[in-house]
């Protein structure tokens, strides 16, 4: 798979997540955040397991203990991101949440440098700032007074950055994107259900009322999109992946307008243009510079 194809997979994942944002927001009117997280990732685990089994059958090298530990750690980061985002939505707006979550575009290069000792291509820094500015403008160019939910969402952005960075490293080393997906989904689903059983009430009526959102987010936003993420990250860098994945805010705004009747302001369209510009420069500039560099 080429880097261009990998980044297109990440763009598709972002589009699916954009639709999931709408489902997450409407589901919260009826179900608690941890039951929603637990059920969506249980569904995702069931969806991805057959494909992980086929991947295992075709693999030539086994998954070692180091890989399993990494997969579980990524699952913990995924749960942290999902939980803090969902809890944050209880006391913040969708606009604020989508903007603040997009901070992972900036956090990923910092984490890559601090933890993995892998400095990104220099173009990623202006690209990350462009994407960050684009998300800000897409939100209307202004934020309301910060709430507890906003603070939870900042923590969420850190968890997403950790998950993206570690997933990129683990899938490259193990060559098992679907196994990684299955493990991280199972870890998140199990923790979500256990926490929900302790903290939140549940009934079949509630599950029935939110079944459509749970299935969409479980099958597509979780099962399919996260699998596309880890597959795509085998062939691109974590920093570039973060910029492409951040376009979920763009798709979320577009689907919000289409499904919920929300509107995008003129300044929001400028934000969309900045985000696409960021994706374009991180895709084109490294390739152009590589072609211009003479062979040794």
Image (cartoon, rainbow, N blue to C red):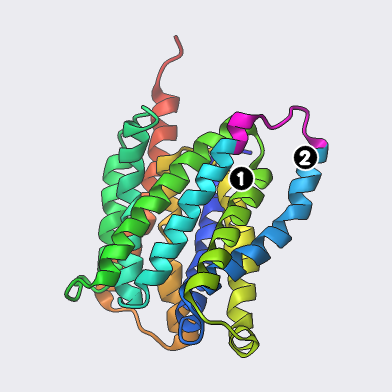
Query: Which residue matches tag 2?
Result: 56
Residue 64 falls inside the magenta stretch = yes
Q: Residue at x 63, y 55 (%)?
A: 186
Instruction: Work out whether mark 1 precedes mark 2 in sequence or the reverse, and give the earlier one.
Output: 2
> Which of 49/14 is in front?
49
Residues 54 and 67: in front is 67
**Rendered residue at 34%/51% (across/down):** 158
User: Label 2's element?
Assistant: helix
Q: Which residues are magenta?
A: 58-68
Image depth: mark 1 or mark 2 in front? 2
Look at the image and tell me in which quarter the N terminus lies. top right
Is residue 174 in view? yes
Left or right for 123, reference 261: left
Q: CA distance from mark 1 to mark 2?
A: 15 Å
Residue at which label 1 appears: 231
Please tell me whether residue 191 is drawn above or below residue 279 in the rendered image: below
């Amino acid at each position: 798979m080429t880097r261009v194809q990998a980044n297109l997979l990440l763009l598709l994942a972002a589009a699916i997540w954009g639709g999931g944002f709408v489902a997450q927001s409407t589901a919260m009117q009826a179900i608690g955040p941890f039951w929603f997280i637990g059920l969506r990732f249980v569904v995702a685990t069931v969806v991805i397991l057959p494909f992980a089994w086929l991947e295992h059958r075709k693999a030539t090298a086994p998954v070692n203990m180091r890989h399993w530990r990494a997969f579980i750690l990524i699952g913990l980061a995924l749960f942290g991101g999902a939980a803090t985002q969902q809890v944050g939505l209880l006391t913040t707006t969708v606009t604020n949440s989508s903007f603040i979550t997009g901070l992972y575009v900036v956090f990923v290069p910092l984490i890559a440098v601090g933890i993995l000792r892998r400095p990104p291509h220099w173009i990623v820094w202006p690209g990350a700032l462009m994407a960050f500015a684009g998300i800000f403008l897409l939100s209307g160019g202004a934020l309301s007074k910060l709430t507890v939910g906003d603070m939870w969402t900042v923590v969420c952005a850190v968890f997403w950055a950790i998950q993206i960075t570690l997933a990129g490293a683990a899938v490259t080393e193990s060559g098992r994107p679907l196994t990684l997906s299955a493990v991280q989904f199972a870890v998140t689903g199990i923790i979500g259900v256990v926490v929900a059983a302790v903290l939140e009430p549940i009934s079949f009526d509630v599950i029935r009322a939110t079944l459509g959102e749970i299935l969409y987010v479980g099958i597509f936003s979780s099962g399919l999109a996260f699998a596309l993420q880890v597959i795509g990250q085998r062939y691109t860098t974590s920093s570039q992946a973060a910029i492409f994945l951040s376009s979920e805010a763009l798709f979320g705004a577009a689907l919000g307008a289409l499904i919920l009747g929300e509107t995008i302001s003129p300044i929001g369209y400028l934000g969309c243009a900045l985000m696409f510009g960021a994706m374009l420069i991180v895709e084109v500039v490294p390739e152009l510079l590589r072609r211009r560099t003479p062979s040794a």
